[in-house]
């Protein structure tokens, strides 16, 4: 049998030596592969810089502003512009913070403690701003007049804050599922019962993350309805 890239022929294919005449071609191919690897790495770095050009705190502040402006806009449109039922404002108060938190890039999420603090500030500031707008329109006091009204205000604040936390937990759950898949692939390379470990990693991560998000979402919905019906 003839081996075009070898100096000698061997019917069993053993101890074959690459001919020196083909070394330049192989070196050129190796350089092309190295250039492609460098180009891919540069593209990946540019993409990550484009996505993560803001610090986690800057992105979190952006999500807070989107939620805050969205809530005030919903209050103006639903209550003052079209005079709709307050239930629509409560539903918007749950959906807007949740969607804003979910839209945050999962690769650069800040610490959960920071998002909890931002959620608390969002709930307090947005409800105070809505109350101020109502007080200005109806010429009434911005402060609750009874303990019952104060309780409803606190429940509304908690509903907004928990909606924001729910959206953040959902996004973290999706990111955690991706990371567990990467971990399982790494284990698969090591060939250490990867099928069982992959299943356990994915199930555990999804149960914890989705379960927590569902609980906070339900609490946000319940507190929002309670603040509405009083």
Image (cartoon, rainbow, N blue to C red):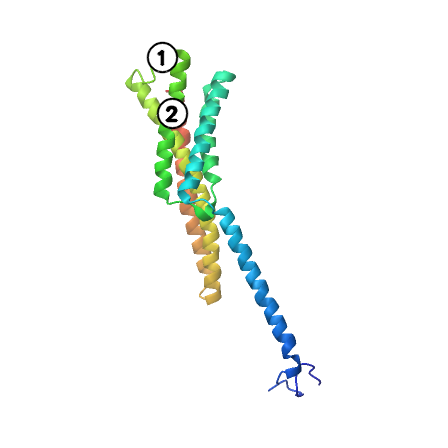
* Residue 70 vs residue 162, the one in the foreground: 70
Q: Nearer the viewer, residue 31 or 201?
A: 31
Task: Give the residue furthest to the left.
Answer: 147
Ranked by sequence position, the earlier of labels 1 and 2 is 2
Across and down, in percent, residue 78 comes to: 49, 20
- Is residue 106 found left or right of 154 in the rendered image? right
x, y percentage for residue 155? Answer: 35, 26
The answer to whether 67 is drawn above or below residue 176 in the figure is above
Residue 158 position in % (x across, y down): 36, 30
Residue at horizontal 46%, vertical 48%?
107
Task: Examine the rendering and report whether any part of residue 194 can be seen.
Answer: no
- Alpha carbon distance from label 1 to label 2: 16 Å
Tell me the residue at 39%/15% (across/down).
136
* Residue with the mark numbered 2: 127
Q: Quadrant of residue 215?
A: top left
The N terminus lies in which quarter of the figure?
bottom right
Which quadrant of the structure image shows residue 54? top left
- In the image, what residue occupies the spot 47% across and 27% down? 91
Circle 2: element type: helix
Q: Mark 1 highlights which residue?
A: 140
**Disc 2 residue crowd, few under 14, some 14–19, many 20+, Cα 10 Å:** many
Q: Pointer 1 and pointer 2: residues touching (CB < 8 Å)?
A: no
Q: Is residue 5 left or right of residue 35?
A: right
Q: Look at the image and tell me in which quarter the C terminus lies.
A: top left
Q: Nearer the viewer, residue 125 or 87?
A: 125
Where does the image place residue 177, in percent across and percent down from the top left? Answer: 47, 50
Vertical order, 56 against 190 (above or below): above
């Amino acid at each position: 049998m003839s081996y075009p890239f070898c100096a000698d022929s061997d019917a069993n294919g053993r101890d074959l030596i690459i001919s020196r005449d083909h070394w330049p071609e192989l070196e050129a191919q190796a350089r092309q592969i190295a250039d492609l690897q460098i180009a891919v790495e540069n593209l990946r770095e540019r993409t990550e810089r484009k996505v993560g050009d803001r610090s986690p705190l800057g992105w979190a502040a952006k999500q807070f502003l989107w939620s805050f402006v969205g809530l005030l806009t919903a209050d103006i449109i639903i209550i003052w512009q079209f005079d709709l039922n307050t239930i629509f404002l409560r539903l918007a108060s749950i959906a807007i913070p949740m969607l804003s938190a979910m839209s945050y890039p999962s690769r650069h999420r800040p610490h959960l403690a920071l998002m909890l603090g931002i959620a608390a500030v969002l709930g307090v500031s947005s409800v105070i701003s809505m109350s101020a707008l109502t007080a200005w329109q109806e010429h009434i006091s911005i402060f609750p007049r009874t303990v019952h009204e104060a309780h409803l205000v606190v429940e509304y604040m908690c509903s907004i804050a928990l909606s924001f936390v729910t959206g953040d937990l959902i996004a973290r759950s999706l990111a955690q599922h991706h990371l567990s898949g990467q971990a399982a692939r790494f284990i698969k390379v090591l060939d250490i019962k990867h099928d069982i470990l992959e299943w356990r990693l994915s199930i555990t991560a999804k149960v914890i993350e989705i379960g927590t998000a569902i609980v906070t979402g339900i609490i946000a919905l319940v507190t929002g309805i309670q603040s509405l019906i009083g």
